[in-house]
Amino acid sequence: MPEIFTIKSYKNQTRLNENGIEAHIRPVLEVDLERAATLFISQYIDELEMFAPVRYELQKGSQAIFLKSMRVIRPHTGAYRFSVKVMAASADSKQVEVSESCILKQD
Protein backbone atom coordinates (compact mmCIF):
# COMPACT_ATOMS: atom_id res chain seq x y z
CA MET A 1 0.00 0.00 0.00
CA PRO A 2 1.40 3.46 -0.89
CA GLU A 3 2.06 6.01 1.83
CA ILE A 4 -0.85 8.33 2.56
CA PHE A 5 1.42 11.36 2.98
CA THR A 6 4.98 12.47 2.41
CA ILE A 7 6.72 15.35 4.15
CA LYS A 8 8.21 17.82 1.69
CA SER A 9 9.80 20.19 4.21
CA TYR A 10 9.79 21.38 7.80
CA LYS A 11 11.06 24.83 8.74
CA ASN A 12 10.78 27.15 11.71
CA GLN A 13 10.33 30.88 11.26
CA THR A 14 12.20 32.39 14.22
CA ARG A 15 11.99 35.92 15.58
CA LEU A 16 14.25 36.95 18.49
CA ASN A 17 13.59 39.76 20.92
CA GLU A 18 16.16 42.50 21.53
CA ASN A 19 18.13 40.71 24.26
CA GLY A 20 18.42 37.51 22.22
CA ILE A 21 17.04 35.31 25.02
CA GLU A 22 13.40 35.03 23.99
CA ALA A 23 12.35 33.66 20.62
CA HIS A 24 8.99 33.27 18.94
CA ILE A 25 8.90 30.17 16.75
CA ARG A 26 6.38 29.66 13.95
CA PRO A 27 6.73 26.13 12.48
CA VAL A 28 5.68 25.42 8.90
CA LEU A 29 5.26 21.86 7.64
CA GLU A 30 4.75 21.08 3.95
CA VAL A 31 3.07 17.78 3.13
CA ASP A 32 1.90 16.00 0.02
CA LEU A 33 -1.17 13.77 0.41
CA GLU A 34 -2.12 10.92 -1.91
CA ARG A 35 -5.75 11.38 -0.86
CA ALA A 36 -7.77 13.37 1.66
CA ALA A 37 -6.73 12.37 5.16
CA THR A 38 -6.75 13.24 8.83
CA LEU A 39 -3.28 13.92 10.25
CA PHE A 40 -2.31 14.26 13.90
CA ILE A 41 0.73 16.47 14.49
CA SER A 42 2.67 16.87 17.76
CA GLN A 43 5.27 19.60 18.32
CA TYR A 44 8.45 19.19 20.40
CA ILE A 45 11.38 21.25 21.61
CA ASP A 46 14.38 19.22 22.77
CA GLU A 47 12.27 16.03 22.97
CA LEU A 48 9.69 17.75 25.24
CA GLU A 49 6.15 17.73 23.88
CA MET A 50 4.90 21.30 23.69
CA PHE A 51 1.30 20.57 22.67
CA ALA A 52 -0.89 17.51 22.58
CA PRO A 53 -1.39 16.17 19.04
CA VAL A 54 -3.53 18.49 16.92
CA ARG A 55 -5.92 17.09 14.34
CA TYR A 56 -5.80 18.43 10.77
CA GLU A 57 -8.38 17.48 8.10
CA LEU A 58 -6.52 17.86 4.80
CA GLN A 59 -7.38 17.48 1.13
CA LYS A 60 -5.40 15.62 -1.51
CA GLY A 61 -2.32 17.39 -2.88
CA SER A 62 0.52 19.57 -1.60
CA GLN A 63 -0.07 22.09 1.15
CA ALA A 64 1.65 24.09 3.88
CA ILE A 65 0.45 23.70 7.45
CA PHE A 66 1.20 26.58 9.83
CA LEU A 67 1.52 24.92 13.24
CA LYS A 68 1.04 26.50 16.66
CA SER A 69 3.47 29.26 17.55
CA MET A 70 5.86 28.60 20.43
CA ARG A 71 7.69 30.95 22.79
CA VAL A 72 11.15 29.86 23.94
CA ILE A 73 13.17 31.50 26.72
CA ARG A 74 16.65 30.29 27.67
CA PRO A 75 19.54 32.21 29.20
CA HIS A 76 22.13 30.67 26.86
CA THR A 77 22.77 30.30 23.14
CA GLY A 78 22.92 26.50 22.91
CA ALA A 79 21.33 24.58 20.07
CA TYR A 80 17.64 23.77 20.20
CA ARG A 81 16.09 20.77 18.48
CA PHE A 82 12.62 21.45 17.13
CA SER A 83 10.66 18.48 15.86
CA VAL A 84 7.20 17.38 14.82
CA LYS A 85 5.68 13.92 14.77
CA VAL A 86 3.05 13.26 12.14
CA MET A 87 0.61 10.34 12.04
CA ALA A 88 -2.27 9.66 9.66
CA ALA A 89 -5.57 8.48 11.16
CA SER A 90 -5.59 5.09 9.42
CA ALA A 91 -4.33 2.21 11.55
CA ASP A 92 -1.86 0.97 8.92
CA SER A 93 0.11 4.22 8.63
CA LYS A 94 3.36 4.73 10.51
CA GLN A 95 4.30 7.76 12.56
CA VAL A 96 6.92 9.99 10.92
CA GLU A 97 9.20 12.39 12.79
CA VAL A 98 11.00 15.33 11.22
CA SER A 99 13.26 17.78 13.01
CA GLU A 100 15.24 20.95 12.61
CA SER A 101 18.12 21.93 14.89
CA CYS A 102 19.21 25.51 15.17
CA ILE A 103 20.96 27.94 17.50
CA LEU A 104 18.87 30.80 18.79
CA LYS A 105 21.09 33.84 19.25
CA GLN A 106 21.25 37.50 18.41
CA ASP A 107 23.33 38.25 15.30
Image (cartoon, helix red, strand yellow):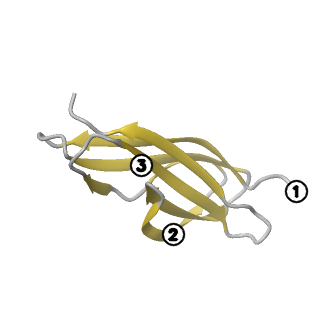
Dot 1, how many residues are within 10 Å of its Cα: few (below 14), some (14-19), or many (20+)? few
Residue receiving disc 1: 1
Q: Earlier in the sequence, mark 2 or mark 1?
A: 1
Dot 3, how many residues are within 10 Å of its Cα: few (below 14), some (14-19), or many (20+)? many
Per the model, the C-alpha gap separating discs 2 and 3 is 14 Å
Question: Outermost residue toward the top?
Answer: 107
Which of the 4 image quarters holds residue 46? bottom left
Which element is circle 3 on?
A: strand
Which quadrant, please, contains the N terminus? bottom right
Question: Outermost residue toward the right?
Answer: 1
Per the model, the C-alpha gap separating discs 3 and 1 is 30 Å
Confirm whether residue 63 shows in the render. no
Which element is circle 2 on?
A: strand
Reply above or below: 15 against 106.
Answer: below
Residue 16: x and y, percent? 22, 41
Which element is circle 1 on?
A: loop
Q: Which mark is residue 27?
A: 3
Dot 2, how many residues are within 10 Å of its Cα: few (below 14), some (14-19), or many (20+)? some
Mark 2 vs mark 1: in front: 2
Which residue does the image show at 49% across and 68% down from the upper left? Answer: 54
Which residue does the image show at 20% across and 49% down from the upper left? Answer: 75
Residue receiving disc 2: 53
Residue 69: x and y, percent? 33, 56
